[in-house]
Image: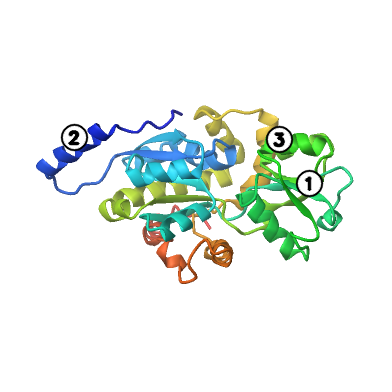
Amino acid sequence: MKRLKFPSPISILLLAGFFYSHPAPAQEKKNLRIVFVSLSWNNQLPFRVAVNKGFFKEQGLAVEPIFVRGGSTAIAALVSGNVDFGSIGGAQAPIRSRARGLDLHIIASLSNFTNYTLIGGKEIKRLEDLRGKVIGVTGAGAFSDFTIRILLKRNNLDPDKDVMLRAIGTTVVRAIALERGAISAAPFTAEDAIRLLDKGYPLIVNLNEALRVPQSIYVTTGEMLEKYPETTKRFLKATILGMQFAKHNKQEAIKSGYAAGLTGEPDIVNRSYDLFSPGWAMDLSVAYDGIQIMLDEDIKAGVVDKKFTLDRVINDRILKQAQQELRSEGRLKP
């Protein structure tokens, strides 16, 4: 998967001049560029299955996956028109971007739950045991910080009084801190969680089943939705088919993942699948309730205007068309 390269300003001007002087009738796109911010199996497997099983080809599409670091880079690529669709972590970035006036929309959800597993120190057995203890997160305001705060509040623990949330960094750094006893718990991706479980660290809660706050979503621009609705529908149909296959055919899906370029220790991948797959959105439907939680927190923090509503950032009209077509074709499983 290659890194994204942006065209030079001169190239952009030349291209703009070409299209201005050679108007063409609107037509659907056949070649799509999809930007991803994660190479984890949880995020990649449904897409890779759709590629390997020919679902995109069946829809008349050729897809080019591109990896970048960070949601802000992915959003910049989308807004600039360098990519067509993006898979990013968490709805906060598109909410805040849309609130600033950027033409960005959430069109589907890969996962309607949080893709973390909370692992504790060996003396921790349940959430209540974390009272007065230190929990490691990526950083203040990061998605891990946000979701742990929500989880604690729902379990009668005040994140500002009953525990100490400490900015530690990535999951690798959090694992080291946990093993050294510097923290008593932290959220981890499924693969990292399996490695810690094998070392005797307890699973406190699997947020893929316990916290309905979408972490992996698909986004695009309003211009893409307006100019290429049929392309968008075909992209979503292929992605849904990949998701369904990945959800219902574990072992064959994992084989497809390897065949399509994913890597990892077979035992770790096999067991981590059981942690992250419960959170997948089978038909990519968007969890409005979970995204509303994120919006409410941003409004409360003053990051987003209190008049901002979800209908300004979520546009799942074409997703519903894709679902209906698959249903009429007898290919949308319950």
How far is the residue under mark 1 from the one under mark 3? 12 Å
- Which of the pair 230/15 is nearer the observer? 15
Q: Position of residue 87 (x, y in %)?
A: 47, 45
Q: Residues within 10 Å of mark 1 (few under 14, many from 20)?
A: many
> Which is more toward the observer, 236 or 195?
195
Q: Is residue 318 left or right of residue 273?
A: left
Q: Amino acid at mark 2?
A: Leu
Q: Which mark is residue 185?
A: 1
Instruction: Please state the horizontal and vertical placement of residue 334, each as a whole percent of the image.
Output: 53, 58
Helix, strand or loop at mark 2:
helix
- Secondary element at tag 1: strand
Separation (CA) of disc 1 from disc 2 = 54 Å
| Residue under label 3 | 173
Extreme residue in the left direction? 21
Name the image quarter holding residue 293.
bottom right
Vertically, is 40 above or below 95?
above
Residue 314 x/y as whole percent: 43, 61
Q: Which residue is identified by label 2?
A: 14
